[in-house]
Amino acid sequence: MKQRVSKIGVFDSGLGGLSVLRTLQRELPTCSFVYLGDTARTPYGSKSPSTVVRYSQECASFLGKHDIDLLVVACNTASSVALDEISQAVVCPVIGTIKPAVRTCLAMRVSHSELAERPIGIIGTRATIQSASYQEEIRRAAPSAALIASACPLFVPLVEEGMTSGPIVEQAIEHYLAPFRNEGVSSLILACTHYPLLMGPIREFMGPRVEIVECADAIAREIKETYEQPENGTGESHFFVTDEVSRFNSLASFFLKGAAVEAVKVEAL
């Protein structure tokens, strides 16, 4: 019998995890959510591993006090370097971004034999790519798979400025993704939760023969396969941040496709 999950905690170093939350809200409509954006200390990608571990444990402990049944770490940096330590900070199960996305990617290769001979592409922040967490997870399951991984540092600031299309975005995508297209990758893992906001121009540039793998879709699928949703849940969401709320509220509405957000500032974690 599946364990029932009614309230899910989601945390990220800032805004990117909202793309995960949006998908979870859509796919798990009877679950309620508590989101924490550690906006005072973002980005995690430029911090040392020990600092990321400390910050992540503090975020997890905060969400654990809200009686969550499941914690989603919607931050690739935290998932890369702190997932074991996060699991020690809460009593509920923890899901990160890496394993669900890799499982989804490899399942595509099994079901579409023509993909198996082509490389897998991975794009993310410098910290995520340098950690090699995605690469190592793929190699454990598919040792012979060819991999191409690269950081795309301009993508996050473009998204946070609300620039998700247009000539500047197209130039940045061509700059970073031309090597992946030239190598004929079979799939492209978006190893950053900001990147789905650029899905349209990324798909257009990479073409129809490339499967795009989003962490959010993979996480939602894993939760639905593993846990049972309540039949008559409220589906409500509550938001917390560690810095001022006005900019977060505005950008969160953009990430959540227009849904109004009223976050509460947390003075200390």
Image: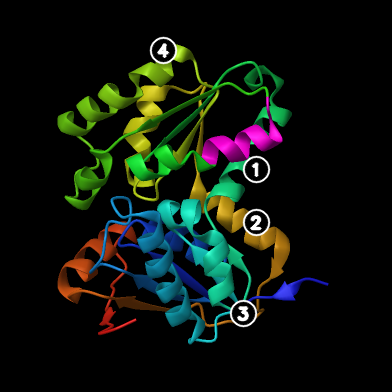
Q: Which sits in the foreground, 143 or 173?
A: 143
Is there CB contact under 8 Å for labels 1 and 4?
Answer: no
Label placed on residue 130: none
Q: Quadrant of the N terminus?
A: bottom right
Is there CB contact under 8 Å for labels 2 and 1?
Answer: yes
Q: Earlier in the sequence, mark 1 or mark 4?
A: 1
The residue tagged 2 is 222
The residue tagged 4 is 182
The residue tagged 1 is 103
Please provide the residue range marked out in magenta: 134-143
Amino acid type for the residue under numbered disc 4: Asn
SS at circle 2: helix
Q: Position of residue 262 (x, y in %)?
A: 27, 79
The residue tagged 3 is 91
Count neighbours of disc 3 (C-alpha within 10 A) and say few if under 14, some if 14 to 19, many if 20 or more. some
Q: CA distance from mark 3 to mark 2?
A: 19 Å
126 left or right, relative to 191:
left
Q: CA distance from mark 2 to mark 1?
A: 10 Å
Amino acid type for the residue under numbered disc 1: Arg
Is there CB contact under 8 Å for labels 3 and 2?
Answer: no
- The reply to whether residue 217 is in sight is yes
Q: Quadrant of the C terminus?
A: bottom left
In this rendering, the label closer to the viewer, 3 or 2: 3
Q: Position of residue 89 (x, y in %)?
A: 53, 76
Count neighbours of disc 4 (C-alpha within 10 A) and say few if under 14, some if 14 to 19, many if 20 or more. few
Q: Earlier in the sequence, mark 3 or mark 2?
A: 3
Amino acid type for the residue under numbered disc 3: Val
